[in-house]
């Protein structure tokens, strides 16, 4: 009997991942900080905060591992989730895999020495890890040259772009400072002066949502900018299909699933100049890599040869699909279970 113990935050990406690989295992148990009743997954809540509570959390995880007896442990996020779990797993031979997210490796270590030491400890106490970009994998191996890092992401659904493109720009990254949504709005404001028939659709939410809406009001863009918040897959894919342009300009990022989705729907992508983005966007071919997010010439979209873009994207999106990446993760499980 194959049993998976999966550990990570209660975000939608982790639940999507469980859905991706669940058929491979006979049982799955999730340890997370807060149970989400929307998902039918056996879950135990554990406090993964740093501090004095760690002692109790370590003991709790040890007890869970002993009683559940998993075949493999898969940790998502190389932060306190990984640290507390790996401390609990000392002297335990159960195969353990670590999936790092972009901020774990590319942002957190630069904040303070403690977070850098946590990342180093985590990467030096697992043998197998996954990254969604070659660039992040390279950064991970700086902490542990012997680390076996596989490149895989959580995948996107197979899509067909049958809807006619409209004069729509789509932005659906989180409304947090890292993602520079205010720059998206500023650049759209300049673009809209000459292109009054275009619309900006802003998805997602975050700490800056209220300020962003106020900004749109101040710029007089209420008729051209629509905030739609969180939407289901059908609505999101429909917007991708209609949008001519997708814009994602975070200050730091690994491979964003939203970018892969936009490419698969043949949006012209404007992205910030980050190494992971360069793995997917060929500047001037299927989008534009922007060195200065303060001033983006969105009018450049008209220079894109859409037939060439579609040919390039067709090749790329095959490796983005869920089934393709599911096989990658299953191969990793089979490797460690040997």
Image (cartoon, rainbow, N blue to C red):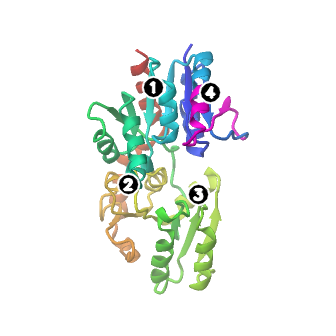
Asked if residue 220 shows in the view, the reply is no
Q: If you read the primary sequence from the N terminus, does the residue marked by circle 1 or circle 4 appear first? A: 4
The residue tagged 1 is: 96
Mark-to-mark CA distance, 1 and 4: 18 Å
Circles 1 and 2, Cβ within 8 Å, touching? The answer is no
Q: Can the viewer see residue 262?
A: yes
Quarter of the figure that contains the N terminus: top right
Q: Which mark is residue 238?
A: 3
Q: Which residue is mark 4?
A: 60
Confirm whether the magenta stretch covers residue 40.
yes
- How crowded pointer 2 is (Cα within 10 Å; few <14, some 14-19, many 20+) is rated as few
What is the spatial separation of the Cα atoms under label 3 and label 1, in whole angstroms?
A: 38 Å
Which residues fall within the magenta stretch?
38-60
Residue at (44% x, 19% y) in the render = 91
Helix, strand or loop status at disc 3? helix
Q: Name which quarter of the figure residue 308 lies in.
A: bottom left
Mark positioned earlier in the residue sequence (2 or 3):
2
Q: Pick whichever, 308 or 47, lies toward us.
A: 47
Residue 121 is situated, as x and y percent measured from the top left of the image, at 39, 36
């Amino acid at each position: 009997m194959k049993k998976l113990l999966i550990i990570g935050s209660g975000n939608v990406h982790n639940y999507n991942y469980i859905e991706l690989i669940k058929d491979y295992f006979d049982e799955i148990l999730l340890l997370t900080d807060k149970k989400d009743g929307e998902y039918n997954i056996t879950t135990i809540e554990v406090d993964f905060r740093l501090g004095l509570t760690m002692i109790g959390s370590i003991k709790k995880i040890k007890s869970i591992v002993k009683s559940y007896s998993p075949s493999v442990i898969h940790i998502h996020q190389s932060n306190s989730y990984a640290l507390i779990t790996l401390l609990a797993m000392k002297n335990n031979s159960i195969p353990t895999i670590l999936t790092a997210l972009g901020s774990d490796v590319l942002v957190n270590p630069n904040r303070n020495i403690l977070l850098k030491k946590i990342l180093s400890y985590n990467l030096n106490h697992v043998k197998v890890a996954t990254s969604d970009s070659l660039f992040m994998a390279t950064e991970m191996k700086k902490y542990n040259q012997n680390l076996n890092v596989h490149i895989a992401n959580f995948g996107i659904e197979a899509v067909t772009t049958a809807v006619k493109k409209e004069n729509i720009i789509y932005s659906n990254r989180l409304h947090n400072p890292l993602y520079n949504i205010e720059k998206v709005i500023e650049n759209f404001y300049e673009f809209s002066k000459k292109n009054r028939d275009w619309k900006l659709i802003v998805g997602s939410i975050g700490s800056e949502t209220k300020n962003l809406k106020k900004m749109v009001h101040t710029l007089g863009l209420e008729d051209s900018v629509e905030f739609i918040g969180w939407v289901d897959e059908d609505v999101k894919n429909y917007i991708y299909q209609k949008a001519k342009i997708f814009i994602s300009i975070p200050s730091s990022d690994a491979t964003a699933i939203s970018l892969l989705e936009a490419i698969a729907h043949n949006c012209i992508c404007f992205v910030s100049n980050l190494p992971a983005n360069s793995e997917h966007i060929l500047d001037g071919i299927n989008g534009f890599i922007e060195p200065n997010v303060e001033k983006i010439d969105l009018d450049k979209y008209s220079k894109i040869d859409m037939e060439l873009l579609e040919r390039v994207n067709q090749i790329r999106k095959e490796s983005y699909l869920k089934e393709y990446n599911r096989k990658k993760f299953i191969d990793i499980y089979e490797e460690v279970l040997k």
